[in-house]
Amino acid sequence: SQTIHQWPATLVQPVGSPLSLECTVEGTSNPNLYWYRQAAGRGLQLLFYSVGIGQISSEVPQNLSASRPQDRQFILSSKKLLLSDSGFYLCAWSLGSGNTIYFGEGSWLTVV
Amino acid sequence: QKEVEQDPGPLSVPEGAIVSLNCTYSNSAFQYFMWYRQYSRKGPELLMYTYSSGNKEDGRFTAQVDKSSKYISLFIRDSQPSDSATYLCAMSDGSSASKIIFGSGTRLSIRP
């Protein structure tokens, strides 16, 4: 069966520091991968998605970036965090043209 | 107007009650409908998945889709304290999982 791992689970970072959140999927090949941000009362916001290695689509312009160095690895990064980057970040995956996505456990980011 | 509207709650009911959670939507092209359950500080978990109109039952959970009214529901029978969570509806037109639209979630509390 497929599993998704996301880390770290919680982090507190100062303004202006870099960020790296990692996500890996096991038990499948060539998944579509996603990064979402969830703000309280505002639902899920799609940040990036990828249909293959090195292929990244950005949905929202911001100071975050994403990379997919391997088939089942997805990384969310920032060179300099802003206070507004605080939130709950979720990695997710789907297969092909599938219409359901499956989420990781999430990463809580607090920028101070 | 948002594409998907969901009452944020909170909704509080006694244990054993039947719970009804609802979403309305505006895009008639939506064909795939999902319900996710999200416990506090965890990633959303896929609960129910339905295609087009009709009902789908899984244990104590029933998902209902009325495309003519652009209205979907999730019913929980014999509700348990462990059902206390936020429930997110989601839907798509099937073109891409990156086009899945999520509701903002309804917070549900089951009182023992």
Image (tube, coloured by chain):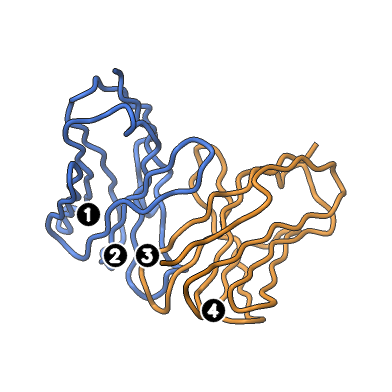
Chain colours: A orange, B blue
Residue A57: where, in percent of width, then height? 61, 73
Camera-nearest label, 3 or 2: 3
Residue at image position (41%, 74%) is B96
Task: Determine the secondary structure under disc 1.
Answer: loop
For disc 2, the marked residue is B30
If you read the primary sequence from the N terminus, does the residue marked by circle 2 or circle 1 appear first? 2
Q: Nearer the viewer, mark 2 or mark 4?
A: 4
Q: Identify the chain of the residue marked 4, using the numbered disc in the image.
A: A
Compared with B38, B78 (above or below) is above
- Crowding around mark 4 (Cα neighbors within 10 Å: few <14, some 14 to 19, many 20+) is many
Image mark for residue B110: none
The residue identified by callout 1 is: B70
Assess whether mark 4 and mark 2 are in contact (beta carbons under 8 angstroms).
no
The answer to the question of whether label 1 and label 4 lie on touching residues, with beta carbons closer than 8 A, is no
Q: Chain of mark 2?
A: B
Asked if labels 3 and 4 touch by Cβ distance under 8 angstroms, the answer is no
What is the CA distance from the residue labelled 1 to the residue labelled 4? Answer: 30 Å
Q: Residue lying furthest left in this view?
A: B54
Q: Which residue is mark 3?
A: A100
> Image quadrant of residue A20?
bottom right
Residue A51 has which mark? Answer: 4
Work out whether residue A63 or residue A2 is closer to the camera in this orientation and state it. A2
Give the letter of the chain under mark 3.
A
Q: Secondary structure at mark 3?
A: loop
B71 w.r.t. B67: above or below: above
**Mark 2: which secondary structure?**
loop
CA separation, marks 2 and 1? 9 Å
Q: CA distance from mark 3 to mark 2?
A: 13 Å
Name the spot of residue B80 as percent of width and height, x first: 26, 29
Tell me the chain of label 1: B
